[in-house]
């Protein structure tokens, strides 16, 4: 059964580790992430962007697939199904469809409007036991057409959103989506420490987890980050394994063209990547 992300993130914050949010794109992705979480006794958050929700055929289809896999694979670790970078309308669509957690990304609005919209979503989601993530200071890079330059969030604005009682807060600290450029300046830890001080016990979220050096990830966790999002890295390892399979001509041998065989190496590559991240984040055996 899907659960809100609230309890797993409070445990992570108190235990000084982070829960990984792994974005899903299809059945292989979802199954790989769920099995890896179960094998490593780790809580996990399945992230769905609005674009991926559309690609998979509607939020209802995503909820049906995830719930079916939880039952069929006998998954017993805590699993949250979370809308990633949701619009105001998208958040409501996911609340209706049966997601257990939503992110409302109001970072592109003026702070007053971000607060007003966040407040409404928090009230309506909490009434149904659904956790909510909000964002201050846009995250750099591109996520399904949402482009941000990697801003440093305003500490006072972070406090205003945190004071609404949101479950978790995503604050820009120079992190970006996608692959990091060679001239990336790194995470702004001073800003993170200031944000942490202003929001108190609020679990913080680090977006753009692909390509951040391990020591920076560990430092971010020590400064209050309890949820880390990973998407691009799984896509890259999936693509590399699939390419290798095809370049080796394996799809031309026997029934190697069968999607169950063709996508097998990519599926295993996702599992390997997710396991590495769970080890790094410290969530193994924390379910």
Image (tube, rainbow, N blue to C red):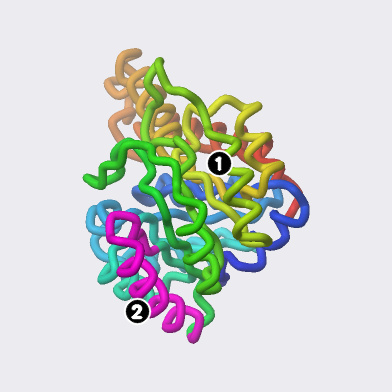
**Residue contact between numbered discs 1 and 2, judged by CB atoms under 8 Å:** no
Does 11 sit left or right of 57 as displayed? right
Camera-nearest label, 1 or 2 = 1
Which residue has dot 1 on it?
191
Marked residue nearer the N-terminal end (1 or 2): 2
- The question of residue 120 being in magenta is answered with yes
Which residue has dot 2 on it?
96
As drawn, 195 above or below 257 = below
The crowding category of the residue bearing disc 2, from other C-alpha atoms within 10 Å (few below 14, some 14 to 19, many at least 20), is: few
Q: Nearer the viewer, residue 73 or 51?
A: 51
Q: Looking at the picture, how far across and down is residue 264, in whole percent?
A: 43, 34
Name the residue located 29 percent from the left edge and 39 percent from the top edge: 142
Does 31 sit left or right of 83 as displayed? right
Residue 2 can be seen in this image: no
Residue range (magenta):
104-127
Task: Give the residue at the far bottom of this rendering.
Answer: 127
Q: Looking at the picture, how far across and down is residue 152, in whole percent?
A: 44, 41
Q: Quadrant of the N terminus?
A: bottom right
Q: Looking at the picture, how far across and down is residue 235, in whole percent?
A: 38, 34
- The question of residue 246 being in magenta is answered with no
Residue 1 can be seen in this image: yes
Name the residue located 57 percent from the left edge and 61 percent from the top edge: 79
Q: Secondary structure at mark 2?
A: helix
Name the residue located 43 percent from the left edge and 66 percent from the top edge: 102
As drawn, 185 above or below 83 = above
**Is the magenta region chiefly helix, strand or loop?**
helix
Q: Secondary structure at mark 1?
A: helix
Q: Nearer the viewer, residue 253 or 31?
A: 31
Q: Quadrant of the C terminus?
A: bottom right
């Amino acid at each position: 059964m899907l659960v809100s992300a609230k309890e797993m993130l409070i445990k992570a914050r108190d235990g000084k580790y982070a829960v990984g949010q792994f974005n899903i794109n299809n059945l292989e992705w979802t199954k790989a992430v769920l099995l890896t979480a179960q094998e490593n006794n780790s809580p996990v958050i399945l992230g769905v962007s609005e674009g991926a929700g559309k690609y998979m055929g509607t939020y209802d289809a995503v909820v049906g697939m995830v719930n079916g896999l939880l039952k069929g694979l006998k998954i017993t670790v805590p699993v949250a199904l979370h809308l990633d970078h949701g619009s105001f309308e998208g958040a409501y669509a996911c609340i209706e469809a049966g997601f257990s957690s939503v992110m409302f990304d109001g970072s592109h609005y003026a702070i007053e409007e971000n607060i007003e919209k966040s407040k409404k979503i928090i009230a309506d989601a909490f009434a149904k036991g659904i956790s909510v993530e909000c964002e201050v200071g846009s995250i750099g890079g591109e996520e399904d057409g949402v482009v941000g330059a990697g801003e440093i969030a305003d500490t006072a604005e972070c406090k205003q959103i945190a004071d609404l009682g949101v479950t978790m807060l995503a604050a820009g600290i120079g992190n970006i989506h996608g692959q990091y450029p060679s001239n990336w300046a790194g995470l702004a830890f001073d800003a993170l420490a200031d944000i942490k001080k202003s929001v108190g016990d609020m679990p913080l979220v680090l977006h753009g987890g692909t390509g951040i050096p391990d020591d920076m990830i560990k430092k971010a966790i020590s400064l209050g980050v309890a949820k880390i999002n990973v998407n691009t890295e799984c896509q890259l390892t999936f693509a590399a394994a699939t390419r290798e399979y095809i370049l080796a001509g394996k799809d031309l041998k026997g029934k190697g063209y069968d999607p169950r065989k063709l996508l097998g190496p990519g599926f295993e590559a996702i599992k390997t990547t997710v396991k590495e991240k769970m080890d790094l984040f410290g969530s193994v055996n924390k379910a």
